């Protein structure tokens, strides 16, 4: 198995090659995709003649989905060129190499989760604009976060539109009956007949997606959100400055707080890849998106890879949420160890 870490600016973008199977895990930000990933994938497709058996979108945050959308837009440009050229029409060849063919996509579309997604995006964008006028660094960071989510919602909707049957016609979640991709049992998924790579979904569970859906619906319906910026600013003023000396907070009290992880991140699609080694044994790769350590442990336990209280050593662990202090703690780092940590 070979894993290539591709530039993603601040997100994730990984190309995983295991014998005949090729997987693109997330796409990073649009700028890093067009400047770096686009050229790499074009050369890779040209040199190897391979397709992408799976494009896997862990969740809808912009730093994971935006590059995937650009890949689809590039595919559209080449398809339009091919159509015009085949019909004798004047056509300008796209100024980049042809992207690899995408055989399938796994992605829990935002619109499938929350019908009011466009309205949520508009409200978040408005919140971001309000916060941007502040001089408070914390509020400015929050504005960036709101703007990122607001941008990711239309991008997720566009991804769904591009892969539809009347456009690129790329199967979505076909291995899940075209429904949401989540833990449904202890099944093993193979992308090619007799393929060496077994995929198991270790997250999200159904309850995580229901919480995600309920969270956004309640957030949108709550009229009190109109005053949320004022409340937040007051809270930040009340809590400005360092924690008083002797307050008794250790680093462990600050780590792994699941309540500090956003609902889109908690709904991350997370995978366990297993490939048989020629001399015996199994290569294991854990892809975590921006999920939380508790959910990773639950998923691995569900598939019988983690005994109660026990640990697991894997070949590769893609650290969840880029190593965020909210998504892992000391216990997780002791229980799940790896030869290679990808950040």
Image: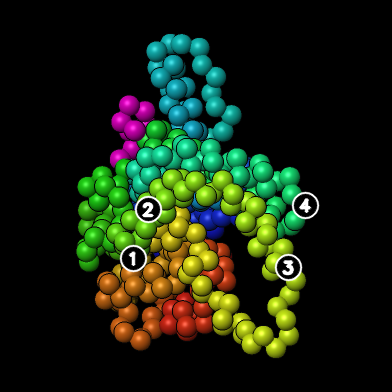
Circle 2 residue: 214
Distance in Å between CA atoms under marks 3 and 2: 32 Å
| Front-lying residue, 79 or 65 | 65
Distance in Å between CA atoms under marks 3 and 4: 14 Å
Circle 4 residue: 135
**Which of the marked residues, 3 or 1, is nearer the chain's N terminus?**
1
Q: Are marks 3 and 4 in contact (CB under 8 Å)?
A: no
Tell me where the magenta segment starts and ends, as one range. 164-171
| Front-lying residue, 237 or 305 | 237
Q: Residue at x 43, y 82 (%)?
A: 335
Mark 4 secondary-structure assignment: loop
Distance in Å between CA atoms under marks 2 and 1: 22 Å
* Figure check: 38 above or below 57: above
| Front-lying residue, 47 or 316 | 316
- Label 3 crowding class (10 Å Cα cut-off): few <14, some 14-19, many 20+? few
Q: Residue at x 70, y 78 (%)?
A: 243
Q: Residue at x 58, y 77 (%)?
A: 254
Distance in Å between CA atoms under marks 4 and 1: 42 Å
Circle 1 residue: 202
54 in the magenta segment: no
**Which of the marked residues, 3 or 4, is nearer the chain's N terminus?**
4
Q: Residue at x 41, y 80 (%)?
A: 313
Mark 3 secondary-structure assignment: loop
Circle 3 residue: 240
| Front-lying residue, 2 or 186 | 186
Mark 1 secondary-structure assignment: strand
Q: Are marks 4 and 2 in contact (CB under 8 Å)?
A: no
The image shows residue 182 at horizontal and vertical percentages of 30, 57
């Amino acid at each position: 198995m070979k894993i290539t870490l591709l530039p993603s600016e601040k997100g994730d973008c990984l190309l995983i090659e295991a014998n005949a199977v090729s997987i693109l895990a997330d796409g990073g930000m649009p700028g890093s995709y067009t400047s770096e990933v686009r050229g790499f994938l074009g050369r890779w497709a040209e040199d190897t003649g391979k397709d992408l058996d799976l494009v896997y979108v862990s969740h809808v945050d912009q730093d994971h989905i935006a590059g995937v959308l650009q890949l689809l837009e590039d595919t559209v440009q080449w398809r339009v060129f091919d159509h015009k050229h085949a019909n004798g029409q004047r056509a300008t060849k796209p100024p980049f190499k042809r992207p690899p063919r995408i055989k399938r996509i796994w992605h829990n579309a935002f619109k499938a989760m929350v019908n009011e997604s466009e309205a949520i995006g508009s409200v978040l964008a408005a919140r971001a604009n309000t916060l941007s006028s502040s001089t408070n660094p914390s509020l400015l960071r929050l504005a960036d976060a709101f703007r990122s989510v607001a941008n990711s919602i239309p991008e997720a909707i566009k991804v769904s539109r591009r892969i539809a049957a009347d456009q690129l016609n790329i199967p979505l979640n076909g291995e899940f009956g075209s429904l949401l991709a989540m833990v449904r049992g202890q099944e093993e998924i193979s992308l090619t007949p007799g393929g060496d790579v077994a995929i198991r979904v270790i997250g999200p569970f159904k309850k995580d997606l229901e919480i995600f859906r309920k969270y956004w619906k309640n957030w949108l319906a709550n009229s009190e959100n109109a005053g949320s910026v004022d409340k937040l600013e007051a809270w930040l003023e009340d809590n400005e400055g360092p924690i008083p000396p002797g307050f008794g907070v250790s680093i462990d009290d600050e780590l792994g707080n699941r309540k500090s992880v956003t609902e889109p991140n908690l709904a991350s699609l997370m995978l366990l890849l297993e490939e048989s080694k020629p001399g015996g044994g199994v290569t294991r790769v854990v892809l975590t998106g921006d999920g939380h350590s508790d959910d990773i442990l639950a998923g691995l336990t569900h598939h019988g890879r983690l005994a109660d209280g026990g640990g697991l050593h894997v070949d590769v662990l893609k650290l969840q949420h880029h190593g965020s202090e909210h998504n892992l703690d000391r216990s997780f780092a002791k229980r799940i160890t790896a030869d290679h940590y990808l950040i």
